[in-house]
Structures are given as C-alpha cells and as structure tokens.
Image: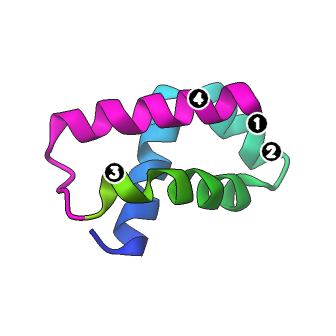
Amino acid sequence: MTDSIGYDYVKLVLEEEFLRAYLRFSNHGILHYELTNILELCAPLIKGLDEDDRFLKYEVIGTIANYLQEV
C-alpha cells in the first residue's frame, strides 16, 4: 500500500469510526498533522497488506483508539 493510499485509508477509518475526533481535528486545522501521526503508528500494519483485509481495519481502529487516548 503506497503512502497516499495508506493516508486515505487511515483518514477514512478515522472519519467512519471516530467522527467526533475527525471533526475536532478538522475544525482546529490539525487534521493533516494528526493523520500523519496516526499513519506513522499504523505503518507496520499497512505495509504489505491490502485494504480488503478485514483484520487490517480492526488493527487500525485499535491503533487510532490508543492514539486518541494519549492526545
């Protein structure tokens, strides 16, 4: 998965599963910054996996949830 596809995938998961956080980041103008941080954490998960892998989404959701607890 390329970086831009990974970024778009993480953005989609954040928007679908964590809409409040997505809107907060967007409204404060820090969405790109936060997505970049989340993508960095998800990089090992995304590398070599395809977005049709249902377990990938669960792993990304868990990673985002952990990230949001720390922010």
Q: Is residue 10 left or right of residue 59?
A: right
Q: Amino acid at mark 2?
A: Asn
In the picture, the disc for residue 27 is 2
Q: Which residue is mark 3?
A: 45
Q: Is residue 59 left or right of residue 19?
A: left
Residue 55 highlighted magenta (yes or no) = yes
Q: Which residue is mark 4?
A: 66
- Residue drawn at point x = 60 percent, y = 55 percent: 35
Magenta highlight range: 48-71
Q: Percent x, y for residue 5?
A: 35, 67
Q: Residues within 10 Å of mark 1 (few under 14, many from 20)?
A: few
Q: CA distance from mark 2 to mark 3?
A: 28 Å
Q: CA distance from mark 3 to mark 1?
A: 25 Å
Which secondary structure, mark 3?
A: helix
Which is more N-terminal, label 4 or label 2?
A: 2
Q: CA distance from mark 4 to mark 3?
A: 14 Å
- Quadrant position of the C terminus in the picture: top right
Up/down of 40 relative to 62, above or below: below
Is 46 or 34 nearer to us in this picture?
Answer: 46
Q: Amino acid at mark 1?
A: Arg
